Image: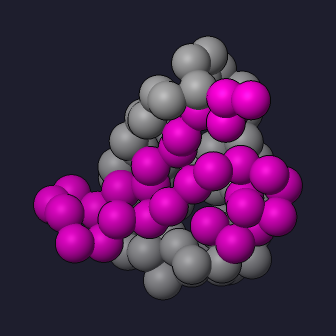
Amino acid sequence: MKNPELRNLVVNFLATEHKKLQLPDYERPYPAKFVADAVGGYAGAIGKVATQIVSDLRAMGIRCSYDSTTTPKRFVLRGKKAR
């Protein structure tokens, strides 16, 4: 699978997972291996395009970050901001 295809699949998957978050202060970690298994890719390839994935999600208004310092590496989705 090419990186642009993988990137689009991961962005769509994380966007649908973000819709499930209910509370504003809620954080949900998604390990790269879990995301790779869900979309049918390789965790190492997801790590290579992680910054692009996060920038795409932020452009959609989704609060997301990629934590590469932890083991396992993971995306962290945050709930919608409280107003």
In the displayed image of the protein, which residue is found farthest to the top?
Answer: 22
Q: Is residue 49 above or below residue 74?
A: below
Q: Is residue 55 left or right of residue 43?
A: right
Measured as percent of width and height from the top left, residue 24 is found at 59, 26
In the displayed image of the protein, which residue is found farthest to the bottom?
Answer: 48
Front-most of 6 and 60?
Answer: 60
The image quadrant of residue 10 is: bottom right
Measured as percent of width and height from the top left, residue 39 is found at 59, 47
Residue 34 in sight from this viewpoint: no
Q: Residue at x 34, y 49 (%)?
A: 31
Measured as percent of width and height from the top left, residue 2 is found at 68, 78
In the displayed image of the protein, which residue is found farthest to the front?
Answer: 83
Measured as percent of width and height from the top left, residue 12 is found at 75, 47
Q: Is residue 30 left or right of residue 56?
A: left
Front-most of 80 and 47?
Answer: 80
Q: Residue at x 42, y 35 (%)?
A: 28
Residue bounds of the magenta highlight = 54-83
Front-most of 51 and 22?
Answer: 22
Q: Is residue 15 above or below residue 66?
A: above
Residue 27 in sight from this viewpoint: yes
> Which quadrant is the N terminus positioned in?
bottom right
- Magenta segment: does it hold 77? yes
Q: Residue at x 72, y 42 (%)?
A: 15
The image quadrant of residue 66 is: bottom left
Front-most of 77 and 81?
Answer: 81
Q: Is residue 14 left or right of residue 65?
A: right
